Image (spheres, grey):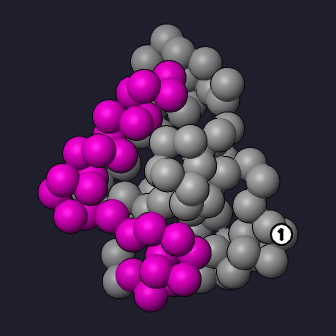
Amino acid sequence: MQNKIKTYIGFAIKSGEFALGVDNILKARKVAIILVDEVLGENSCRKLYNKFDGSIIRKVANLTDITNGAMAFAITNKELASACNKILSGEDGGNIVE
């Protein structure tokens, strides 16, 4: 699962359809999915939940390993977000969170 998420994050970065870090995500105009590390602080999580619909916020184990230290990563492309959501929901046959 981590490899698939990493691949979709790579696609988002290459296409420029992402926001990295809580502050940049809060400034973003449109967000399709927000991936947050399980250890992201309560205050930061609350800020994201207050601005965005909670259903687009998904916790990912060891996200910082994939994003080179960023604890929050938003994808603005709806198709990439949908693909990530399927993986995280286990609809692709994978585990929910490792």
**The C terminus lies in quadrant:** top right
The extreme top residue here reads 93
The picture places residue 32, in percent across and down from the top left corner, at: 39, 61
Residue 56 appearing in the image: no
Image height check: is 6 above or below 14?
A: above
Return the x and y of residue 33 as percentages of the image width and height: 45, 57
- Image coordinates of residue 11 in percent, x first then y, are 23, 45
Q: In the drawing, does residue 62 fall left or right of residue 24? A: right
Q: How many tags in the picture?
A: 1
Position of residue 49 relative to residue 77, above or below, is below
Residue located beneath label 1 in the image: 42
Q: In the image as oriented, which residue stretches furthest toward the right? A: 42
Query: For the point 16% across and 57% down, which residue is it?
Result: 15
Q: Secondary structure at mark 1?
A: helix
| Crowding near the residue tagged with mark 1, few <14, some 14–19, many ≥20 C-alpha atoms within 10 Å | few
Badge 1 amino acid: Glu
The residue most toward the front is 68
Q: In the rendered image, which quarter is residue 3 located in?
A: top left
- Residue 36 occupies which quadrant of the picture? bottom right
Residues shaded magenta: 1-28
Residue 2 on the magenta segment? yes
Residue most toward the bottom?
Answer: 27
Q: Residue at image x 65%, y 40%?
A: 62
Residue at image coords 58%, 69%:
53
Question: In the figure, is residue 90 to the left or right of 24?
Answer: right
Between 80 and 2, which is closer to the camera in this rendering? 2
- Closer to the camera in the image, 41 or 80: 41
Q: Is residue 39 left or right of residue 96?
A: right
User: Measured from the top left, where is residue 40 in percent x and y?
Assistant: 74, 61
Residue 2 seen in the figure: yes
> Could you tell me what secondary structure mostly forms the magenta stretch?
helix
Tell me which residue sits at (54%, 33%) in the image. 88
